[in-house]
Amino acid sequence: MIQKVFANKIIKHSQSLDQARRTLQALSAEILSGSKRAIFAFHRGDAAQAKQELASAREKLKEGWKLVKSESRIAQEGMWRAAQEEFAEADLFDQFLSQGMVGKVNGVAEDPDIFLGAVSDLTGELVRRAVLLATEGKEKEVEKIFQGVTEVVEFLLRMDLTGTLRTKVDQAKQNLRKLEEIRYDSGSTTHCGHCSCV
């Protein structure tokens, strides 16, 4: 009933798509774990190791994009998008630590959802960093993180986000509240003056 040449073509394409999907999932897992190791290294103060992990993850992203270019249907695979978001979070953490501000992340899709998810999750990493800095008595650096997270939350609240992103915005707001407590406990200030944004 099905023309043999056409049937073989469909089978071949299906197998090719399946192989590309499996390869992309494996790359995504490596990007995800490498990005997490980069974040952990930044927390340990090992910037050299963190940047090495980021560079390795960036190379794997390039491999992933080659696969996506050959099989555009796999571009929306959940694991691939999660890997890009985790990489973006690690890269944004690097940007904040080295420049005090964050912006475009090279190597990931120019997709608002990926950036918004990453920058929301970044606030949690900044809380962890603030805890360490507060125990070391570095009030000015805690204040810098507080101001940065305040700006992120204000930015996120300018959009009417829903679903998973809404949950991430709520978590970012909770992270800002934690920073207010850390800031207060470390003696950096008595009142935040930004409570209305949360």
Image (cartoon, rainbow, N blue to C red):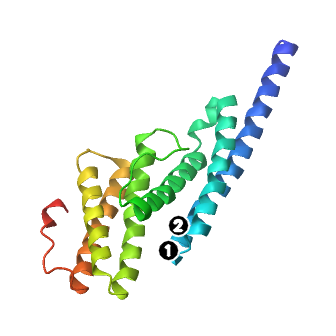
Q: Out of 94 and 122, give the one closest to the viewer.
A: 94
Q: Position of residue 110 (x, y in %)?
A: 46, 38
Q: Are marks 1 and 2 in contact (CB under 8 Å)?
A: yes
Depth order, front residue of 6/81: 81
Where is residue 141, by image quadrant?
bottom left
**Residue at 70% over, 29% down:** 70
Residue picked out by circle 2: 39
Quadrant of the drawing holding the N terminus: top right
Residue 44: image x %, image y %? 53, 77
Q: Is residue 105 above or below residue 15?
A: below
Q: Is residue 138 above or below residue 68?
A: below
Residue 189 makes an appearance in the image: yes
Residue underneath mark 1: 43
Q: Nearer the viewer, residue 18 or 107?
A: 107
**Viewer-nearest residue: 7 or 38:** 38
Q: Is residue 20 left or right of residue 133?
A: right
Give the number of the disc on residue 152.
none
Q: Amino acid at mark 2?
A: Ile
Q: Residue at x 40, y 61 (%)?
A: 96
Q: Position of residue 134 (x, y in %)?
A: 33, 83
Of helix, strand and loop, which one carries label 1? Answer: helix
Across and down, in percent, residue 27 comes to 69, 50
Choose top left, top right, bottom left or bottom right for residue 63: top right
Of helix, strand and loop, which one carries label 2? helix
Is the residue marked by circle 2 packed among few (<14), some (14-19), or many (20+) residues within 10 Å? many
